[in-house]
Amino acid sequence: MARIDRISVDALDERQLGEVRESVLRERDAEAGKPLSVAVMGQTGVGKSSLLNVLFGTRLPVGDGKPVTREPRAITVPGNSDHLVTFWDMPGIGESAAADLEHSAVYLEKLAECDVVIWAIHADSRSVAYDAACLDRLLAQAGPRARAQVLGRLTVVLTKADTLTPPPWIYDMRGPRGSFVPSAPLAARLERKAVHFEQVFVRPWGDLLGAATYNSGEFTLRDDRLDCDAHTVRYRGHFSQEACDAYSAAHPEHAEVFSRLRDNHRVLPCSALFRFNLVPLMLSVVNKLGPTAIFRFERLLDDVAGLGGVPVETMREYGNFVVWDGVRGVNAFDLTRFPF
Ligand SMILES: Nc1nc2c(ncn2[C@@H]2O[C@H](COP(=O)(O)OP(=O)(O)O)[C@@H](O)[C@H]2O)c(=O)[nH]1
Ligand SMILES: [Mg+2]
């Protein structure tokens, strides 16, 4: 898969890999035992724990009714390979204004320490005002350094994209497994939503934002916003689609680098249930990690390709679709009886 190769450290050539390894070897030894830390923020019930479970192979409790998570708490768990993930399950915001305020200082402290910060918003939500106010309030308490750190690691996702129906989802079956893909009109609707949420939730941070990606060696462009060294390419500000298109047109040989920079600020619709868009989400998260965290993450990357599939039998449970012909009193169509 090209997208995975692009990000995998294995895709770098021998010389580049040697350089990267050398430069971080010491830190790596010191860091080796440290778990990867992940924080996820978002309103209660938005699907934070479920998303982390499918991304990192954890078994955090998932709630149906009242909020499962009450206190900001760290759980260190083995993920689906032999790495450890410390997961900061932040109580859903929006349970009560008082609880939100009470937790703000703790949130901020933890967020600034985390390798990964995911902000989850329900894909079907109309208004982002409450989430935006929470992020505002959190970052208002932060010094410039902590603010830049949190914003630099922030990945915004739209959860439960599978609940956006109609138009339909398509199960693309490949033998015993398959993957859910949105139909073209639904894909367009998801894209519009993603763009909208990026405009209202990400873009307003303006020059406080920054985008970064690894430099595999050939990138040397600099201007008043672009900067690079041997390992990293950085952009100061919001790296919008327009900026990405303009830079790529001017320097087509670096289109991939610009596309990775662009991924920093994309809002990603995803679904824990349908395992939809989890690979791009994981890659976007990894893209923002510093070199030492990338080594802690290496094993997770080996599993990344497995994130997308859903077995036929599981799909059947999700697509439990029956048409009852009330006039004739028979099942006109029953997906559960359909021979796959
Ligand atoms: N349809 C759908 N439901 C989901 C998805 N993710 C979580 N849920 C459901 O949403 C509810 C809340 O999930 P949970 O992960 O506990 O949310 P949290 O409070 O944000 O941690 C549970 O009933 C989950 O089964 C998803 O991707 N699609
Ligand atoms: Mg939870």
Image: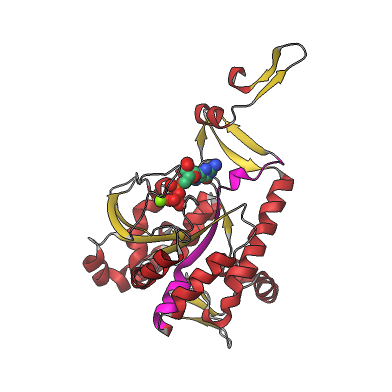
Q: Position of residue 153 (x, y in %)?
A: 45, 69
Quadrant of image for the C terminus: top right
Q: Position of residue 104 (x, y in %)?
A: 39, 71
Q: Position of residue 333 (x, y in %)?
A: 69, 19
Residue at 69% across / 77% down in the picture? 250
Number of residue marks: 0
Residue at 37% across / 67% down in the picture? 103
Of the pair 23 and 274, the residue shown nearer to us: 274
Quarter of the image where one finds residue 260? bottom right
Quarter of the image where one finds residue 240? bottom right
Of the pair 323 and 260, the residue shown nearer to us: 323
Vertical arrangement, residue 122 with respect to residue 201, above or below: above
Whether 159 is among the magenta residues is yes
Whether 36 is among the magenta residues is no
Left or right: 268 as drawn, with respect to 216: right
Left or right: 43 as drawn, with respect to 24: right
Q: Is residue 155 visible?
A: yes
Residue bounds of the magenta highlight:
145-167
Of the pair 264 and 232, the residue shown nearer to us: 264
